[in-house]
Image (tube, rainbow, N blue to C red):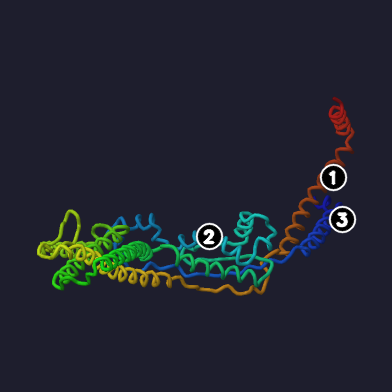
Amino acid sequence: MAIVLAKHKKLILGFPFLAAVVTAGITLLMPNWYTATAKLLPPQQSQSNAVAILGQLGALSGGTSTALGLKNPSDIFVAMLKSRTVADAIIERFKLKELYDEKYLQDARKALSKNADITAARDGVITIEVDDKSPQLAADISNAYVEELERLTLRLAVGEAGQRRLFFEKQLQKSKQDLATAEIEMQKLQERTGIINPTGQASLSVAAAAGLRAQITAKEVQLSALRTFATDQNPDLMRTERELEGLRVQLAKTGKASDEKGDVLVGIGKVPGASVEFIKKFRDVKYYETLFELLAKQYEIAKIDEAKEATLIQVLDKAIEPERKSRPKRALIVLITGLLAGILATLIAFMKEAVGRAHADSSNLRRFELLRRYLLNK
């Protein structure tokens, strides 16, 4: 073996050297790529109703939290960071279609996904790594992912508070419209009849009954919001049910409510007929006015809770401009190429030696000639 290596030393040494030189020249033509890294702390679930629910489930809480994504909330935010919404926002922000020389948006998304690596470690820390030929752009895109995540979490109902906020927001908008309609109807009646307040006592009774009924409706709305994520054993849900029952009992004692229709009616048998219509309009205004105020309070509470949840997304390491390139690793490429070329040259040397020995043997030479003849002839 040593004799063969010494005999073909020029091939074994020269070919790897030549391959290494050519590879080095090629790698020098390759552009440098830089990797910028940003890290986020794992988002923490607030100790609210969602956590209380899992606590009540006991042994089942582990499996349930996994199913709901509450055991490792970092996975949710990784999915959000990889979403099309975030990708499109970054592509538009940095004009990546032109930078990546892509005609279609979907191709720009694929190019961005290849250059961006977003992962969550076992400890929950989210890592955002972005590769680019420009170190400054790599850092800017990495930080832009964090900014777009914060914006997206403000728009989406990620947590329990966000769900409550969206629920109360819809109910509040409906209540506002109903209140505006009731006020317009009462104003039209006043303009048509000239009635302002036919009887102060009736108006007070109407206002009190309407306010009580509005509280019941608000509690029912709150109960519906809780049922979207809470179990029957949730303490907040149970307390709300008790409060709702108490309000219903109080309304029933007045003897002026209809449980079937849900109307707020007062004893208006002695009120002049011309004033009955005004009292009904006045009742509707007071009802929707009180309901709007109660829902507005619940909405503001949900917004505050949601803001608290949103602030839990904290940046552990902000991406900075990388000082060293991440690829290509020229020295490693040249080394591997030279090693493979050396192995190939060694194999060629031994093959040449084997062929030479075969030609030296006349019997083997005749066999090669016979094989060549059979291969060439059809």
Between 84 and 61, the one nearer to me in the picture: 84
Across and down, in percent, residue 173 comes to 36, 64
Left/right of residue 57 with respect to residue 249 in the rendered view: right
Between 192 and 198, the one nearer to me in the picture: 192
Across and down, in percent, residue 275 comes to 18, 65
Residue under pointer 1: 352
Query: Could you tell which of marks 1 and 2 lies nearer the N-terminus?
Result: 2
Can the viewer see residue 130? yes
Quarter the C terminus occupies: top right
Left/right of residue 221 with respect to residue 330 in the rendered view: left
Can the viewer see residue 50? no
Residue under pointer 3: 10
Residue at image point 17% right, 70% down: 198
Residue kind at label 1, given as amino acid type: Lys
Q: Alpha-carbon distance for marks 1 and 2? A: 61 Å
Query: Could you tell which of marks 3 and 1 lies nearer the N-terminus?
Result: 3
As drawn, the label of residue 85 is 2
Across and down, in percent, residue 98 comes to 68, 62
Packing grade of label 1 (10 A; few <14, some 14-19, many >=20) is: some
Left/right of residue 105 with respect to residue 198 in the rendered view: right
Packing grade of label 2 (10 A; few <14, some 14-19, many >=20) is: few
Residue at image point 84% right, 58% down: 18
Residue kind at label 2, given as amino acid type: Thr
